[in-house]
Image: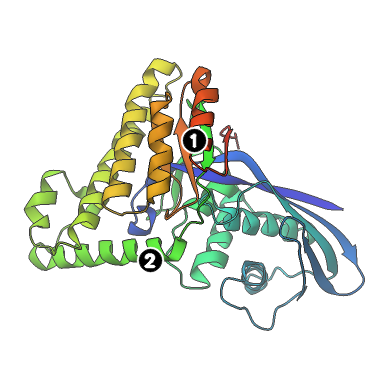
Amino acid sequence: MIRVKAPARICLFGDHQDYLNLPVIAASIDRYIYIEAQPNRQGVLNFNLSDLKVTRQIDLIPAQVEKGDYLCSTLSVLHANHITLSSGYDIKIHSEIPVNAGVSSSSALIVAFIRFILEATETRASDLQIANWAHQAEVEFFNEPGGIMDHYSSALGGLRLIEPETRHTEAFVNPHNDLLLAHSGLSKSTLGVLGKAKEYALEAVAKVRQYEPQFSLKLAEAEDIQRLGSKLSAPLFPYFEAAIENHLLTKEAIRIYRQAISDESSLSPLEQLIERHQYYLDTAIKNTPELMRIQMNEAKNAGAKAVKVMGSGGGGCFIILAPKESHPKVIRAVLQQKAKFVEPIQITSH
């Protein structure tokens, strides 16, 4: 019997930034997807996804891969890297991670599936290699707009800075022991929100470079927003503004995390930055539906210090930073606004 698991992730800073090659700060959390696998003599993979009440059978080397079939794309990516199962398995998959909710259930599935295949084939690979293969299988294989944040968070674990351009990553000391995860009850809109945000942000940058060819988001300052944003159409400007502002917020957060803060009084600057980040995600990128906005406001009225949508947005989950003593009141307030669940979470170590 082979048993493996992989965690969900939350993003504290940098949502809608990694596909622009800008840094993010994300973390793995104590919600996992589990795989148990037993060899069979059929020469195929029999899957039992118990939470979804779905069973399916897959060849060891898929002849074709349908759009969004991450199990088959993972097998194909590893086969291209000369890692192929030599026998069949009966595979049970159980998950504590909400699906289509912005906390990377699909990425965690791929990371866990890769770990199973590596163990079954007695292949050694670093966590960083696993993260890169997972990104290949989910994003590059299907030419989708996502970045590396989800795969790096799930494969490497902990609270960390992730630099998409260089694929550099740096672990931070975790100061957050007051987190709640809330599910709005709405399904997120990954490709809709994400595709539009990426398209508009890249179009805005391309337009600005017609006037200033050396312009770089990574080097942009706040004064560039109005100076160069005046060259943009009304639909493009908010995405340009959000890209610069959120990058500046993330850079300030990196500076604070590198101080390895540990006392709760030092968390206030981070909470303010997270609130500002959410402001741009909501008003510029428009990834926060009205019901979620109501739930977030109720959380703050009940004592939360900061709230922020997870993932691409359009629905799904959001995180709440609130003192532990206010958790019961915050949970009640958000549940009264039709949230699916609100529960404490912890950032996991590697």
Question: Looking at the image, how many numbered discs can be counted on the residues?
Answer: 2
The C terminus, quarter of image: top right
Check disc 1: other Cα within 10 Å, few if <14, some if 14-19, many if 20+.
many
Q: Position of residue 292 (x, y in %)?
A: 42, 45
Q: Position of residue 214 (x, y in %)?
A: 15, 60
Q: Position of residue 47 (x, y in %)?
A: 78, 65
The residue under the point 20% across, 51% down is: 241
- Picture layout, residue 66 above or below residue 213: below
Residue type at mark 1: give it: Val
Distance, label 1 to label 2, CA atoms, is 29 Å
**Which mark, residue 88?**
none
Q: Is residue 26 left or right of residue 341?
A: left
Q: Position of residue 12 (x, y in %)?
A: 42, 39
The residue under the point 89% across, 74% down is: 42
The residue lying toward the viewer, choosing from 326 and 308, is 326
Q: Taking the image as drawn, is residue 285 in sight?
A: yes
Q: Is residue 137 left or right of residue 264?
A: right
The residue lying toward the viewer, choosing from 237 and 164, is 237
Q: Residue at label 1?
A: 334
Q: Residue at label 2?
A: 195
The residue under the point 58% across, 60% down is: 134
Residue type at mark 2: give it: Gly
The residue under the point 7% across, 52% down is: 227
Check disc 2: other Cα within 10 Å, few if <14, some if 14-19, many if 20+.
some
At numbered mark 2, what does the secondary structure look like: helix, strand or loop?
helix
Q: Of label 1 and label 2, which has the lower sequence position?
A: 2
